[in-house]
Amino acid sequence: MNDFAIEKSWQVLQTHGAEMASLHMRDLFAKDPDRAQKFWREGAGLALDFSKNRILPETMTHLLALAKAAGLEQKRAALFAGEKINTTEDRAVLHMALRDHREGLYKVDGKDVMPLVLAERAKMKSFCADIHSGKRLGASGKKLTTIVNIGIGGSDLGPAMVCEALKPYWLQGQRVFFVSNVDGADLAGVLQQIDPETTLFLIASKTFTTQETMTNAQSARQWFLAQGRSKADIARHFVALSTNSQAVSEFGIDGDNMFQFWDWVGGRYSLWSAIGLSIALTVGYDNFEKLLMGAHEMDRHFQQAPMEDNLPILLALIAIWNRNILGMSAHAVLPYDQGLHRFPAFLQQAEMESNGKSVKLDGTNVTGETCPVIFGEPGTNGQHAFYQMLHQGTDIISADFIAPARSHYEMGDHHAKLLANFLAQPQALMQGKSLAEVKAEMKRAGASDGDIETIAPHRVFPGNRPSNAIIFEKLTPQSLGALIALYEHKIFTQGVIWQINSFDQWGVELGKQMAGAILPELSVSGEAKPKVSKHDASTNRLLNHLNDMRQSGA
Ligand code: G6Q
């Protein structure tokens, strides 16, 4: 990393950005018949079309120079070598080891982590086999066919997203539920649907101290006992996925029923670890392995492909261009696949918790912008909701359109219609429709001159709105693994360029602390509480009013 070279690269990009401001992608496509070919890359079973961005080949040259100046290659090597790149927590970042099988490559403090990884994977495999074969039964001798994962954040979003995406692979008779919110509605809603005799609870928490998870876990245990089950039965129905063996044993789960992972697995990068047990139990261990293999293939691609052909790097650089040079503050993730309906929520955490930072690794403030707002919904639903703003809003929002060529649910022309929309939306965003075109179209349709004057401006689409398209053959465990890892490495690459630590999350602490202070002041079950005046006036007023309402039963 060379500060001077970085600064210079940013300047080159700013100048280039100003030159590009007046160009319209429509003209860029018209001028260059090879454009789609030039900005198309493939890797790990995925294809990326980034031609519908406001870029020229030299844009990519300048962006790649920035990545080089920021030391991306060295930092990537440090990541894979297990260096403690999460400096504020003094931790290595090695989720890639969880999807590899080769020993001797991933070391923390000089010690190979693979024997531990492989042993835990073997334990998960045999546990799944025992559950699925009925060798391990519930306390009353029934098969455990319902999985309830209790966890939040990284211990929920990844496995929940994957289980939804891999529904066509669910083992027959197997069901899975995810409980995350401390709002009792979440747990209550699941408890209504399950039978304690056939349910296996997975308490998924890296720290085993998280308020929401511990509250839900305690309540689930109470419910289980209240259903006529004994304390001795708990061992057959509760399993822990954690790094904290002491807290797990204090909760009453013994070592045999605990699956380990390690501090070098970040919460939002943990679905590949024991945190993925809900996935393995739902889709079968072999499919879980295929998910790991898909991600591993992307790891290899990220490590080995030249930077100019490297999917995660390209995706990151385009995002940097849109965010830092063209000033776009939001990015939409738009999967045209119902199975991926939780993918935007997953990425919302992965990207915003990782890169929503404003202090650099050296403790100084960042000077430009970092992570944009990430949001999204599956297509075509989003089209009937917020796409209006994507097409005609005052903010320009970049987007990733994601789609498989084939569906697991080929039914008549459903998938062709889905794909037609997947193709049309980015096309419309890119091309737009000018006032002259709108007027001509209205005239052809027989509109009066008066109508044309009043309505035409509302029907103009400025176009020139950027998007990437990511396609693959089918949503399988393997392609899903590759897709998730693509984004993980995109996030890493952006963090390197912004010079921030993508792997801590101090921003979630303050609210937690304050909630801890407020909790004792709240009426738990309608009991009277003294008036509170020690907070800011707004918090005092809200708290006192809530207590009044809780006490009066209103
Ligand atoms: C993820 C975050 C966060 C974490 C949850 C749950 O990277 O650290 O989302 O996963 O707060 O934490 P536990 O797994 O420790 O319960």
Image: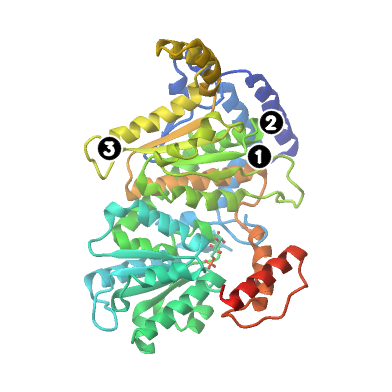
Q: Which of marks 3 and 2 is nearer the N terminus?
A: 2
Q: Closer to the camera: disc 1 or disc 3?
A: 3
Image coloring type: rainbow
Ligand 1 is found in the corner quadrant, namely bottom right
Asked if one can make out residue 51 in the rendered structure from this viewpoint, the answer is no
| Residue with the mark numbered 2 | 9
Q: Which of 11 and 186 is in front in this view?
A: 186
Label 1, label 2: how many angstroms apart (C-alpha)? 9 Å
Q: Where is residue 30 in the image (x, y as percent from the top left)?
A: 48, 13
Is residue 232 visible from the viewing direction of this image?
Answer: yes
- Ranked by sequence position, the earlier of labels 1 and 3 is 1
Residue at left 47%, top 20%? 35
229 relative to 394 in the view: left or right: left
Please give the label number shown on residue 264. Answer: none
Identify whether 119 is placed above or below 474: below
Neighbours of disc 1 within 10 Å: few (<14), some (14-19), many (20+): many
Q: Label 2 amino acid?
A: Ser
Give the position of the C terminus as an image quadrant. bottom right
Q: Does the residue labelled 1 lie within 8 Å of ligand 1?
A: no
Q: Please give the residue where the numbered disc 3 appears in the rendered image.
A: 414
Q: Name the residue under label 1.
A: 70
Q: In this view, does 71 lie above or below 214?
A: above
List x then y, in percent, for residue 23. Answer: 59, 18
Frontmost residue, 342 versus 37: 342
Q: What residue type is labelled 1?
A: Ala
Sequence-wise, the earlier of marks 1 and 2 is 2
Residue 144 lies, in percent from the top left, at 28, 73
Do residues under tags 1 and 3 come within 8 Å of each other at their CB atoms?
A: no
| Residue sitting at x 42%, y 45% | 483
Q: How crowded is mark 2: few (under 14 residues within 10 Å), some or many (20 or more)?
A: many
> Label 3 vs label 2: CA separation?
47 Å
Say what secondary structure mark 3 lies in: helix
